[in-house]
Amino acid sequence: MPQISLKFVPVWFAFAQLAFLATAVAQEDLSRSVTINTLGYYKAADGTSGGVMTPVKINLNPNPTGRIRLGFFEDEIDGYGEMWRAAAWVSHAIALDISGADSTQIQIEFERSGRVDGPSAGGLTTIGILAAIRGDSVRQDAAMTGTINPDGTIGPVGGIPHKIDGAADADMKLVLIPLGQRQDRDENLERDVDLFERGQSRGLEVKAVGDIYTAYELLTGSPLPRPGPAADPQLQPEVYAQVQLKVDEWLLRFKNFQTEYKRIPSSYRSEYCESLMSEAQASSQRIDSLLTEGQAPLAMRDAMEAAVSAGIATAVSNTIWVDAARGRESAKDYVRKFAQIHEKTRIAVDRLKQYKPKTLGEAGVLIYGFSALTESLAYQAAAEAILAGRIHVPIEDSELDPDEEDMLMAAYAMQIAALDCEHVRDLLDIAGDLEGPPMVGTDRIIEVAVFLRRAAEANLNQFEQVVVANRAKSENATFASSQFSLMQRDETYMTARVGIDVATPTLRKFVEDTDSWPYAELGAAINTYELSSLLMATHYSLGVIHDKYGDIERVGREGALQFVLDFATDQARRNIQLLQDNGVDPGAAVFSWKIASILRGRQLLDRFEALRWLWEANTQSRVLAHLGGFSAKLEKP
């Protein structure tokens, strides 16, 4: 049996960045334009590579419809490729979040000549939209390349030597590149070159930037507002006590699974299941020392991991046993019944529908809960698709036939889905009565949900165009076959796609005609946006190397990963403090930050999990600040 990377991270809040109603721009100020100089590279007919600089005009105008809109003006068919359009939607979301502008009052339009595609102008596009909103001008002798991450960090890209050449040919004096990319491959020389030396040899200055705040000031001369510096956040004593109780509950689940596992005859305990139980035992043994150190949030995370690993090992072993004793159909039926998923889903839905938030803090908990439920529904749908033969998930180094592999992977997915439902109960139990401004109406929540759903769809489209389509081209395969192949091997991609296509519509049916539906819509949108953004970071920006089964082997851009972790850690501190300064109890965001602060010092997989926790903490804080109307109460950096 294989070693399958356990990617269970409870979905408390996705890491998207949003923008709503904080500081609406006056209508009389809503007509202006900014021009940015984007960079690209190409391969000519003779096989050589070159670079080009192309101006893009960004127009800001009043929004006559009150709906979220982007306009793309082109003078050629398909002038804006799918990747560029998707990246523009993501840039739009981040720019509006940082500015606090009202997305229903302004309309952004892009205007350019020729054809362009790719996500590498995401950072510069964000700066251009921000400048248009804020009334700043962008240097016309400067250009930039780099993607944009949801926390405002600038992600690495390719082809930079050729882009520098294109900038020099257009008489640019400054080129901004992503931090951590001093060297990049020159396709013509077939080797890496020093980018700073390349710029100097072409008569321009090259500067590396890691985040949108640094890049914006270099290109406009004006600083962006940002929450002020803050100390490490702490949980309230009563919340910390609740977390300690949850540690005991998850440890009890682990021990119950462990007891049941020992009753299974050894002949049905595969090597994979034995390794899972060893991992579970190791996680459980860290808990006492973590509690002694005052790290109850991480102790809860490790207790959950122990229960998840032991639960999967038990479910898979029992499935093998039933298959041997009663046949394949009985085993498949057992997979569906062992986790008691339908009953657990019903209980989770009922508890969420009964929870009536009175404050901003409590609204955040409810949205978190629906995020967790969305993930559960995605895993349930994936398990059913596997059992029905619509998806095949191969198992590393397995000697089983494909039908057996599918049955065991379905058991794995069902168990995670069941534990996600139980996590919903944790969220509501830990929350209690959270302080903060009163929650008045749900109009803003609906607006955020609509906007973020579109951003999530755009982000997943960006991933599919950048990663899946290029993979299909390199393998001389159809897009559909490459998409299917990648979904089989990448759990995050599978749950993101299934989350949009199946889980979100299913969730809507559960909550339609109730006052919970706005919170459910937002929770589902955040979940899918988070997953799709994580896909872009791992498969594109950070240069992660995956094995043939989709597991992370190493990261190609270690410096970029470390910077993103450092920046996200600091940004989360600042955003949490902003909530506290406005009387909001951000307990869930603090919980996420505490876990990430330790995980980021562990192994590679733990560091990526830490990044997700940090993005979740940032998003939760920003969403609540926007909903509370005080996201613009910021300091200059």
Image (spheres, rainbow, N blue to C red):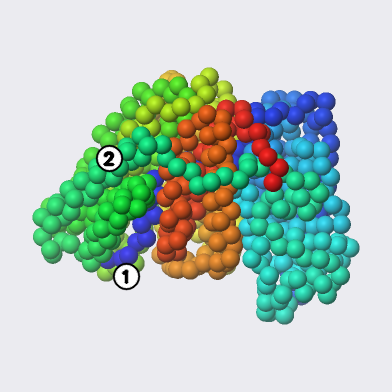
Label 2 neighbourhood size at 10 Å, few (<14), some (14-19), many (20+)? some
Which kind of residue does numbered mark 2 sit on? Answer: Leu
The N terminus lies in quadrant? bottom left
Give the residue at x 74% y 50%: 216
Q: Which mark is residue 397?
A: 1
What residue is shown with label 2? 245
Q: Is residue 113 visible?
A: no
Q: Would residue 212 appear left or right of 322 to someone viewing this image?
A: right
- Seen in the picture, residue 295 relative to 452 is either above or below; the reply is below
Residue 534 in the image: above or below residue 363: below
Q: Nearer the N terminus, badge 1 or badge 2?
A: 2
As rendered, which of 256 and 117 lies closer to the eye? 256
Q: Position of residue 562 (x, y in %)?
A: 55, 61
Q: 409 or 259: nearer the eye?
A: 259
Looking at the image, which is closer to me, 506 or 60? Answer: 60
The x and y percentages for residue 83 are: 65, 52
Q: Nearer the viewer, residue 550 or 167?
A: 167
User: Residue 441 location, x and y as percent?
Assistant: 53, 19
For residue 265, side relative to residue 481 (left or right): left
Q: Rounded to the nearest whole Å, what is the CA distance between mark 1 and mark 2?
A: 40 Å
Q: Label 1 sits on what residue type?
A: Asp
